[in-house]
Image (cartoon, rainbow, N blue to C red):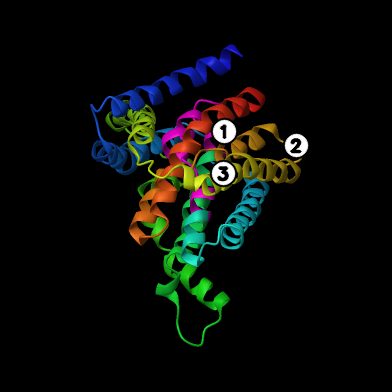
Amino acid sequence: MSTLITIVLPLFLIVLTGYVAGAGKWLDIAAARVLSRFVFMFAMPVAILNFYTKAPPPGLELVPFLAGYFIAMLSIIALAAWSGYKFLRLDIRQSGAHAFVSTCGNAVFLGLPIALQVEGWGQPFLMLMILEGIFVFGIATTLMGWKNHAQDGQSAATRLMAGIAKSSATPFKNPIVLASIAGVAIAYSGITFPTPISTFLNTFGPVAGPTGLFVLGLFIATLPKEGLQSLWPNISAVSVIKLLLFPIVAGGIVYLFTGGDIRLTGAVVLFTCMPPAVASLVQASHYGVYERETAVAVSVASVLSLLTLTIVLLILA
């Protein structure tokens, strides 16, 4: 329990500091976007490279782990899209946005700083970030831009596969995905950086975690929350799927696939129990679909996740 407090309490205090900065009007959502871009484009890629210079390269033991997550991810994104279409009366584009906010977690700002502090969780966590960046983004953005991919005479399945193919290059423009891939290559090659480069990585990399957590708190305080009452069905659906169902399904499958490996099970449960990513709001805004619902869901689920995350770490860390 003391270890849990040592790891989690400082992180939550940083999130709280960001929230106070936003609630007190010292910083606004424009500042949150600038800081998040700094973390996303610069600080976190450096932190990832710094991690891989000290970590052993991933081995074949991660294959069942990644396969388990992949099956769980496809199942949950399909369930979220279908339930949004069936029960919330959303159209295909809205269902895609609903699936995105129900599946894509805040791995960069909240999850990775925690994973890098728990022995054995950092490397598998980064592998999951690569899969999420490719497949969750590809499938969800294809649905969100559904009309843009439609062509006369094509079946729905053909349009979906064409959309995924069209979106498949997008993750490789993501600096965090690129840093993860480069980090894996560095780990396998055994490259050793000269002292000035190592000093730069050791100095700049640690900035990412605290800044990302501060930005999360700032976003919670400044995201719009209008019309909360009318959106409870949407918020409830996102919260149950993202914070409860996804971790249970992914953790169960990975536990079975890895022969009961608690380390890998803990890493995937942490990854999937993250609150919805701010990126889901960015994408909803980009496609002009499901924006208000996404903003409110991100805010509410981020607060709820503080409880679920504490329970996960208490049991599995």
Query: Marks 2 and 1, how far apart in space?
Result: 15 Å
Foreground label between 3 and 2 = 3
Residue 254 image point, x, y percent: 69, 44
In this figure, which residue is indicated by the disc labeled 2? Answer: 260
Q: Residue at x 35, y 28 (%)?
A: 214
The foreground one among 221 and 158 is 221
Callout 3 amino acid: Ser
Q: Secondary structure at mark 3?
A: helix
Q: Is residue 295 magenta?
A: no
Callout 2 amino acid: Gly
Residue 177 visible in rendering: no
In this figure, which residue is indicated by the disc labeled 3? Answer: 236
- Graded by Cα atoms within 10 Å as few (under 14), some (14 to 19) or many (20 or more), the crowding at tag 1 reads many
In this figure, which residue is indicated by the disc labeled 1? Answer: 121
Q: Residue at x 25, y 35 (%)?
A: 28
Q: Residue at x 52, y 62 (%)?
A: 90
Left or right of 294 on screen, residue 222: left
